[in-house]
Amino acid sequence: MKNKVIPYGRQHITEEDIQVVIETLQSDYLTQGPKIAEFEEKFAHYVGAKYAVALANGTAALHLCAMALNVKKDNKVITTPITFAASANCVRYCGGEVVFADIDSDTYLLDINAVRQLLEASPKGTYKGIIPVDFAGKAVNLEEFRELADEFGLWIIEDACHAPGGFFVDSEGKEQFCGNGKFADLAIFSFHPVKHIASGEGGMITTNDEVLYNKLLQLRTHGIVKNNDLYTNSVEFAGGKEAYPLWYMEMQELGYNYRITDFQAALGNSQLQRADEGVQRRREIAKTYADAFQGKNYIKGQSGKVEGHAHHLYVIEVEDRLGLYNYLREKKVFAQIHYIPCHLMPYYRQFGWKEGDMPNAENYYKHCISLPMYPTLTEEEQQFVIDTIDGYYGK
Ligand SMILES: *Cc1c(COP(=O)(O)O)cnc(C)c1O
């Protein structure tokens, strides 16, 4: 234990994962092969959505979502300050304006009441959409957000990067899985190594909307269409006689190359098979932490309401966070801070955001620390983390 670093999160690559990647490397396809379609189909099934589009990374997924929903210059979009900056940046890529709304101090999620206040304070049509984030793996109650969004004519992009396998319980008592497309127009995931499913770099968009789905496919590959029914140039121009020739295609919009490779998709597929196991193990780890910290007044643990939590992160709030962070680091426990409030990043300050704008988020940032949380964290390692924290606070 003494010489081994315990990080806050890490990937788990098995022999089987390695084998499928090797097989793909030896196949005819390095990119745009059968593994991508397989990954999309299996992932859509896993989260319970109709369609899935695999992409180069989660940030590309967010960018294409904003494009598909037509975010334009100065369009206002609401999101949470306690998230990875990419959740907000996708609006800026399209020239839109990011409007932050504060978090709920118990759940750390975007506070629906804060969002409602913003919406009610402006004429209808002022805001175009909301990007709630299933922060740390806790699912946002999207049924409530959908109702609010419908009232004001907004779309929803669910940033579900932390929460594959997470769910909330709806008003009828049903489990609604993150990214199932029932309430959000689009949902996005990331397969960066610290996330639940690792493909190196990688991302996914899920949706139940066929029109958006087709648009995303087009935007993923340069805005190119390959469908006889959709061409706008004539058959004659294309070089055909009665029909468009086989080689023909049209670039109809300004898209990107945001494709994932086939060997990454193969790795994603293999990892996806163990996704449920991983979430299960994360829930065990969370329970061990929660039990160990119960009744200790130097720790404010995660909210008691943990049903459906996917536990990407295990966040606690403490006094003297810097001291604890450094002490853990000395003992080779590399805890992490999630997140520095996005509205106070120098980039966003230029738009006028300042300290005091989001009191709950800013107060949370003063105390939060993410403890090691990943399926291969051993019981012994976890106990070491707990004992080290207790040791620091002198218990
Ligand atoms: C990881 C992450 C992203 C971005 O995903 P990448 O694959 O790293 O581009 C976006 N939002 C959240 C909340 C994330 O955790």
Image (tube, rainbow, N blue to C red):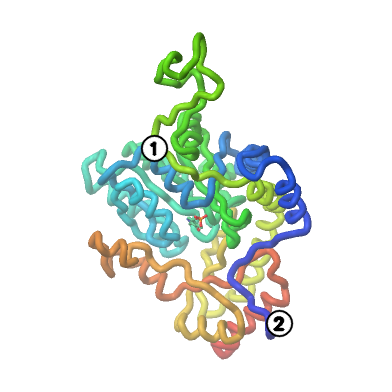
Crowding at mark 2 (Cα within 10 Å: few <14, some 14-19, many 20+)? few
From the viewer's side, name the closer residue of 21 and 333: 21
**Residue under label 2:** 1
| Amino acid type of the residue tagged 1 in the rendering | Leu
Earlier residue among tags 1 and 2 = 2
> Where does the image place residue 339, in percent across and percent down from the top left?
44, 67
Q: Residue at x 31, y 39 (%)?
A: 152
Q: Residue at x 44, y 21 (%)?
A: 231
The quarter in which the C terminus is drawn is: bottom right
> Where does the image place residue 358, in percent across and percent down from the top left?
32, 64
Q: Residue at x 63, y 41 (%)?
A: 36
| Amino acid type of the residue tagged 2 in the rendering | Met
The reply to whether callout 1 and callout 2 are in contact (CB within 8 Å) is no
Q: Residue at x 46, y 53 (%)?
A: 133
Residue 111 visible to an observer of this rendering: no
- Mark sitting on residue 254: 1
Helix, strand or loop under label 2: loop
Residue located farthest toward the bottom when viewing the structure as drawn:
394
Q: Is residue 272 left or right of residue 86?
A: right
Helix, strand or loop under label 1: loop
